[in-house]
């Protein structure tokens, strides 16, 4: 599933749409997690796109005070391309100078508009925009949940998924199984710093393309891929030597999710 760096890469890839007017919306196949209908976009048609923003893993296109929200699910893609480029095109947004296609093979993605879009936003603070570090440290250190589960809780911190949680915890030297309440305030602060560092580096590399993630930035080929997966230190490296200490990278299941870590470097 695309996480914060991938969604941020998509946001940047669509920046050229800002200022353009949405002429019409077409639905070749509105079957998504929530079925898309023409009626839900009436507040956006004929309006100018005034901004594109991201909160956690969610992307919002703002048409004045009318938002259109996208969640990419597992295989969702937002591409500046022709509708016929994919048999899995679900919704087509025709702007004055470009065409944006919402494509999804597995139909786990969704698009919402207006008040429904705002209601779907995560309650947690954006992982790349933590303003009140003390409040987040308090939430982390008062929880009895494993610290990895805390990172994945979108009601606490929005945008982190399984891949980046593993890399952040390794960067901070913290075992993913440790309970939040067992962390010191200094350790929690170190983790927040590691979160920001990992996310910014991943954004610089335009995300991680393990299976499905692609984007279309101006000047690059239509289906470009991210490169951060080449820098993974623990994720998906079970049985391989730790690049820091040489010990074998471990894999367990935590909260139903594969969890990768070094039991020497992470305490």
Image (cartoon, helix red, strand yellow):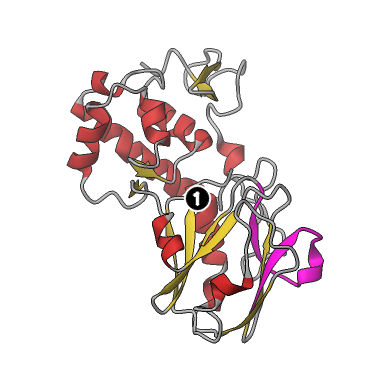
Tell me: 18 left or right of 133. Answer: right
Coordinates of residue 165 in the picture (x, y in percent)? 45, 33
Instruction: Tell me if 259 is positioned left or right of 132 in this view.
Output: right
Query: Which residue is tagged 1?
Result: 5
| Quarter where residue 85 is shown | bottom right
- Residue occupying the point 56% across, 29% down: 235
Q: Is residue 87 magenta?
A: yes
Q: Which residues are magenta?
A: 75-94
Question: Which residue is drawn at the image coordinates 76% and 70% (left, top)?
Answer: 83
The quarter of the rendered structure image containing the C terminus is top left
Residue drawn at the location 76% of the way across and 72% of the way down: 82
**Which residue is depicted at the point 61% across and 38% down?**
230
* Image x and y of residue 44, in percent: 51, 78
Left or right of residue 233, residue 31 in this image: right
The answer to whether residue 142 is above or below residue 50 is: above
Q: Secondary structure at mark 1?
A: helix
Q: Residues within 10 Å of mark 1 (few under 14, many from 20)?
A: many
């Amino acid at each position: 599933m695309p996480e914060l760096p991938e969604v941020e890469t998509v946001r940047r890839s669509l920046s050229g749409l800002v200022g353009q007017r949405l002429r019409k919306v077409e639905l070749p196949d509105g079957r998504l997690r929530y079925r898309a209908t023409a009626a839900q976009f009436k507040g956006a048609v004929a309006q100018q796109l005034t901004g594109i923003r991201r909160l956690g893993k969610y992307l919002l296109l703002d048409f004045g005070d009318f938002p259109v929200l996208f969640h990419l699910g597992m295989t969702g893609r937002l591409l500046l391309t022709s509708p016929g480029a994919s048999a899995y095109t679900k919704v087509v947004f025709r702007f004055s100078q470009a065409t944006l296609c919402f494509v999804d093979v597995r139909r786990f993605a969704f698009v919402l508009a207006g008040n429904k879009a705002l209601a779907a936003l995560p309650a947690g603070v954006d992982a790349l925009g933590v303003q009140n570090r003390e409040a987040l440290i308090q939430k982390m250190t008062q929880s009895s949940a494993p610290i990895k589960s805390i990172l994945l809780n979108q009601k606490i911190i929005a945008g982190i998924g399984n891949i980046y949680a593993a890399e952040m915890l390794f960067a901070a030297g913290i075992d993913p199984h440790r309970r939040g309440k067992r962390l010191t305030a200094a350790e929690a602060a170190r983790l927040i710093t590691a979160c920001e560092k990992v996310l910014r580096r991943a954004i610089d590399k335009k995300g991680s393309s393990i299976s499905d993630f692609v984007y279309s930035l101006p000047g690059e080929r239509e289906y470009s891929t991210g490169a951060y997966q080449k820098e993974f230190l623990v994720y998906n490296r079970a049985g391989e030597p730790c690049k820091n200490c040489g010990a074998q990278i471990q894999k367990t299941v935590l909260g139903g999710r594969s969890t990768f870590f070094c039991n020497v470097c992470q305490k």
